[in-house]
Image (spheres, rainbow, N blue to C red):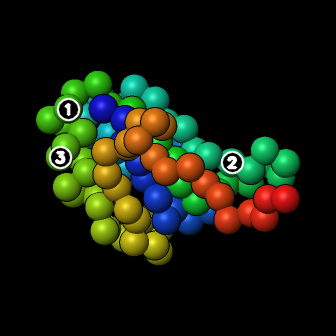
Amino acid sequence: MNIYVGNLPYSVTDGDLRDAFAEFGNVDAVNLITDKFSGESKGFGFVEMGNNSEADAAIKALNGSDFKGRNITVNQAKPKSDRPRGGGGRRW
């Protein structure tokens, strides 16, 4: 299961996130999203866990919890096609 993790402190590393989720089961992959120009964290990322029951336990336990000083958002990631397109920019 692919899990979205948001509202992360910018100082969090892949290892920090992996350690937090490893308490609930095997973590297959961690992907912190970074700015392509500065390389700095954007404050969210994704964790991939192969076992859905372990992933569900992690989501229930970690959603809304304090993680290094911030209350994080944890839920099942939505496929790219299900997300609304961005926008907000002016188009001429």
What mark, if any, has residue 52 been given in the picture? Answer: 1
The answer, for residue 59, to whether it is visible in the render is yes
Label 2 amino acid? Thr
**Residue at 46% over, 46% down:** 83
Whether residues under marks 2 and 1 lie with C-beta atoms below 8 angstroms apart, the answer is no
The answer, for residue 19, to whether it is visible in the render is no
- Closer to the camera, 49 or 81? 81
Q: Which residue is mark 3?
A: 57
Which structural element holds mark 1? helix
**Residue at 24% over, 48% down:** 58
**Quadrant of the image containing the C terminus:** bottom right
Other-residue count near label 1 (Cα within 10 Å), few / some / many at <14 / 14–19 / ≥20: few
Decide which of tag 3 and tag 1 comes sooner along the chain.
1
What mark, if any, has residue 34 been given in the picture? Answer: 2
Q: Is residue 12 left or right of residue 69?
A: right
Other-residue count near label 2 (Cα within 10 Å), few / some / many at <14 / 14–19 / ≥20: some
- Closer to the camera, 11 or 73? 73
Q: How many angstroms separate mark 2 from mark 1 (CA)?
A: 26 Å
Decide which of tag 3 and tag 2 comes sooner along the chain.
2
Residue 90: image x %, image y %? 78, 64
